[in-house]
Amino acid sequence: MKPCVCGSRIFERKVFKASVSNPAARICALTHDQLYKRQLRRKMFSSSSHLPSLSSRGFRSSGTIELPYAWSNGSRFNMSGWVDNTAEITVPAPLPVVWELWQDKSRIPTWMPWISSVEPLKNDRSRWLLSTDQFGQHFEFSWVARDLPPVELHKIHWESEEGLNNRGAVRFSGTESSTRVQIQICYEVPDVLLPFGSAVSPLVEQVLFADLQRFSSFACKVVKALGKRNA
């Protein structure tokens, strides 16, 4: 038995809904059920504000939560609101080298370990798989992205067409010795992450900054290797 959120009476949700026969009573049952779910979701959100600071690698998986893939019909997941995250870093490498490294999508998991794979497709499309352990659980999401026309040596950008709704850009500005790299990702938070509320956005920004730090180290190794080759 669950108390009605309006406090008017006690009802058992499954039995009550099954036994209602007239339209007016069915509407009442639906309204009470929706209010109950809304109250439950608010409680889940309020508890998320007490979550500790999180890193991108610090959790073990206690279960697997996967959203269904829908490549055939292009349907998108049920989302709730867009979130925008940005991170940037100065890389001690020339702009042409940094630009070239980002052109090969197969390299991206090297500095973004939460991206399990990037599969090139036809017509400037690619299929992405994200796999990560966060909040004590394992999450996997995938999407097909379409590359938008790049601005040579300045910007690459994309938007998803199937799967996880997202869009983003990587911007570059630099000199002969260093390059400023800024990554911006805008995405709709999947329902499965809603219980973690405001902890999601700062977590993603931490992960993006760590990714750029790894990219900086990777670019430095490439520059060093190129120097030895040309010596």
Image: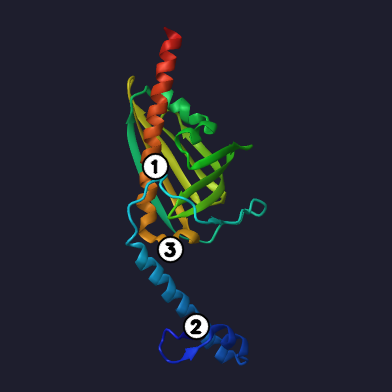
Residue 165, compared with residue 109, is above or below; it is below
Of marks 3 and 2, the one in the foreground: 3
- How far from the left and from the top, in percent, is residue 110? 48, 33
Quadrant the C terminus occupies: top left
Say what secondary structure mark 3 lies in: helix
Disc 1 crowd, CA 10 A, few/some/many (<14, 14-19, 20+): many
- Please tell me which residue is depicted at 59% across the width and 40% down the height of the picture: 125
Amino acid type, callout 3: Pro
- The residue identified by callout 3 is 195
Provide residue 229's location: percent of width, then percent of height. 46, 10
Label 1: which residue? Answer: 208
Quadrant of the rendered image containing residue 45? bottom left
**Between 210 and 149, which is closer to the camera in this rendering?**
210
Earlier residue among tags 3 and 2: 2
**Three-letter amino acid code at the position of disc 2:** Thr
- Determine the residue positioned at 47% across, 31% down: 102
Q: Is residue 22 left or right of residue 37?
A: right
Does residue 191 lie above or below 57 as drawn?
A: below
Q: Position of residue 48 (x, y in %)?
A: 36, 63
Separation (CA) of disc 3 from disc 2: 22 Å
User: Residue drawn 36% across and 50% down?
Assistant: 54
- The numbered mark at residue 90 is none
The residue that label 2 is drawn on is 31
Q: Nearer the viewer, residue 21 or 139?
A: 139
